[in-house]
Image: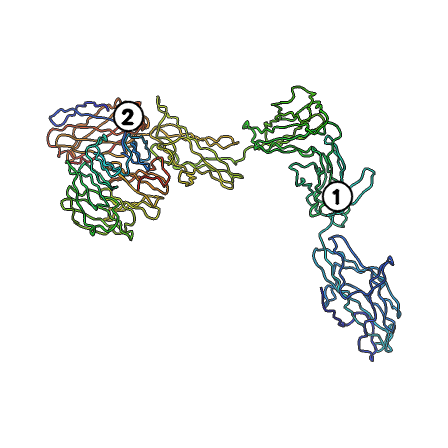
Amino acid sequence: MKLVPILLVWGLAALPLSAQVNSPKIGTARYADGSFHNVQGLPANMIVADLPLDSAQCASFSDSGGLVAQNGIIRLLSPSFSVLAEFSAGERPLLSIDGDLTSALAWLPVAHTLLHWNGTKFETFEVAESDLEGTVTDLQSAGSKQARLLVRHPDNTVSGVTISMRTGNLVSSEPLIGVRGYAFGQGIFVIYAMDKELIVDNLSGYRRTVAFDASDFVAERMSNTWLHLYSPSLRQSWALHLTQADLQLSLLPGLALASSTRGIK
Amino acid sequence: MSRPISFFWLPLALALSSPAQTTTTPAFPFTYYIHDTTGTTADYPLPSIYQFNATPLGNSTHIVLKVVNTSSAPAFMGTVYVAASATTTTVNSNFTVTGLATSIVVPVGGSLLFQVNFSPTTTGAISAYLDTTYQVQASGCSFTSEDPSTQCPSGLNVGAALDGTATTPQLVLSYTTSSGTVTMLQANTSAPLNFGNVSTSASTPITFTLSNESSITLTVPSITVPAPTTYSSNPFSLNASQVPATLAAGASATFIVTFAPGQTGVVSTAIDVGTNTYPIQGAGIVVADVDALQISYVDSTGVRSLPQAATPISFGQLVAGTGTSASLTFTVNNPSTSYNSVVVSSLTVSGTGYSLSGLTGASTFPATILPGASIVFTITFTPTGAGTSPGSMAVGTRSFLLTGTAVASPLPSMSLIVNPSPLSSQQQATVSVQLASAAALSLTGTLSLSFAPSVAKVTTDPAVGFITNSANNPVLTVPISVASGSQAAAYTDSAGTAHTAIVFQTGATAGTITFTVTFPNTPAYTQSYSITPAIIQTTAATAVAQSSQVLLITVTGYDNTYSAGNLNFTFYNTSGSAYPAISYNAASIFQSNFFSSGNTTGGAFVLQATFPVTGDITQIGSVAVSITNSVGQNNQTLTITQ
């Protein structure tokens, strides 16, 4: 990185400006074998580099840090991958971080407990089983005091469930009309696959689709705006760039494992 | 086959008058007999159904009939013909009646001879009836009366049914013995024609004659001499080059079958002429010492074969111009059961493309092979052009023919289709390998990609390559295959999914992508595609007030020329009034990134410009950003996110 001062004439003031140029970073991807990789480049133009991190069973990354879990231990990582905190969950969790470190959440399906990094420590909130009937497929922070979970019901319908991170109580639960099967949240969008299409739906009338062969994908966050999608049946990875203004799905080169040894589930 | 025999009466066309008092038709006065003109067999009554011998189309068979007036009055024989059915007088053209003097009076007990011929014009079963018209001079009528009232009534007798089967036309095969005797061969006989005992150093030809003995032109069926079932090579060779496709009636053609044993022992096979099989046989024997040598060869798969002198030793099919070759390793063994050493006068190989190497067991010729010893050598065929290459090998007086063929390519001509076209940077495009026609065989090959940047001092762009699920980064070669009958090659990924449209990345550097398709024994096919230099392309841009005193402008995109330089920022207040533009030549910081040793993303970049601000930052509404490279200028206006 090279910093160059530039004079900025701004009204009556003359102030320096600095500029820098780097290779664009997409995010951190956990591959099917549990290994981590740094993904750089642009949509449809990606380069993957190995990261010297211990493999993990699940992970989530934002621009501000990451959560990884292996053998029941959840670790909060800085942007440089140093361990900031640990929590012994004793089970395989579902992880999410989509902004600063206080957006770090984990769902412990056996303990039926929500885990939140409040900036200084992990705090837990037990959720009544009656409030969540189904499988949690994703979770995101909804402000500092609530978490929003996507719950897949046995009949394949999906609900958005909001849980208080003060009490662990159910705040609201609403069926997501039209959403079926595995669903994943990204900001205001819900992502799911149906009929050879990947559907991005903001549940308010905005819906975009892209061609997508896999019906069995799973997703993990690579950064604030990038998701890593993986299909165990096709053994194929994709990188999805999703913002309010952009939706781009690219093939992500990746060494896929046999389905019997795949890591993402 | 049985059928009813019916008799009926028709008004006779003969201009004969009948006496008024004799209106009833008389009984049929004649009896038919089958007559043997050689006298060997006594006449016997024509049965109610007579079956002719099966008769080849164009040939004819016949019977001789004797008709006897067995009534008690003279009988007038009008006509005799063969009708198409029992209820018509229409003549069946497959039969003719010859040798009969008609319109004559046959006295009581008198007889006539005539012939009925079966000369079919179409193959298959044919049925007909022997019809006879007649009168009987009885009850006061007279054959010669001109008075209608005394004329004899006429009758029509529908007699025996005549059945015949017309077979396909027949050709006759014969050969001429050394004494000049022509001997006709009997198909499907158990007695084979014997070529006799022939030295393994010699050969015996026999010329056969195929004759069309029918009266029409016939198509000559296929003539083959299959290899004996116990031999991989045929000691009999066939030269039917002089046999035409058709033979006119009465014409003939000759072909030659040569028995040239390369091994000792009795062998049997046959000459097949269409569906007719003519057994033949011969025996390879030892006359001179060299005849006792056992000559064999091993191909690349390890299969050992015993060559016969009559059949060329095949080196298979290769592809011309690819430098490929085929080798066979020969062993010439003097059996340990031999009493004598064998002197081989010479070992020679001739023919274009054939070469001899790897000789062991002998260093010079003449060479002596002791009982139980062998000499081993290799003959290699390297085609010099497409087509069949004849050659020969001689071990002393033991000669064997060699043959090898070369074709231009086992695959039809290839082409590539890229989509989209033309290519540009930052794409995941597809390339398809198409064949001009369906492949005649299945092949596995490779599709390779190389990239030549057009940017000075840049040698590669790691993002350029095929996207697979078997490597963590773009790769430059993928295996492809073509299935027999297919017109496209496919890449099969690690999940077993076949892709005819193979995905590749174009990177972020201007240059030329070259694809090379390689299949075994096929000239490589290469095609190149340019990625032209372009103005800077942005994929994302933001302008954010990071604090009350700092504005951060972030632009993400690529410069495939690596020449980005001037930056220009023009800020506007919320009312739309512009502040003085700020320009800066950022070439050095761009190039520091593009040309750093650790750069793996080609011309991709993220530019972050930070502007310290004094005053009320919320008054800044937007900023126009322009970035210039060697091709042109990228412009965009960003709204400030407070």
Left or right of A67, for residue B550: left
Of the 4 image quadrants, the one containing the N terminus of chain B is: bottom right
* Location of residue A43 in the rendering, given as x and y in whole percent from the top left corner: 31, 35
Q: Three-letter amino acid code at disc 2? A: Ala
- Which of B518/A260 is in front? A260
Mark drawn on residue B564 = 2
Q: Three-letter amino acid code at disc 1? A: Pro
Inter-mark Cα distance, 1 to 2: 92 Å
> Compared with residue B392, is residue A188 higher up or lower down, i.e. above or below?
below
Task: Answer few, some or many: residues within 10 Å of disc 2's Cα (few below 14, many 20 plus, some between 14 and 19).
Answer: many
Left or right of B276, for residue A77: left
Quadrant of residue B572 in the image?
top left
Task: Answer few, some or many: residues within 10 Å of disc 1's Cα (few below 14, many 20 plus, some between 14 and 19).
Answer: some
Q: Identify the residue position indicated by label 1 in the image.
A: B192
SS category of the residue bearing label 1: loop
* Location of residue A229 in the rendering, given as x and y in whole percent from the top left corner: 31, 40
Quadrant of residue B469 in the image?
top left
- Which of B208/A51 is in front? A51
What is the chain identity of the residue bearing mark 1? Answer: B
* Location of residue B286 in the rendering, given as x and y in whole percent from the top left corner: 74, 31
Foreground: disc 1 or disc 2: 1
SS category of the residue bearing label 2: loop
Residue at left offset 31%, top offset 46% = A193
- Which of B280/B81 is in front? B280
Mark drawn on residue B616 = none
- Which of B454/A261 is in front? A261
Counting the numbered discs, the total is: 2
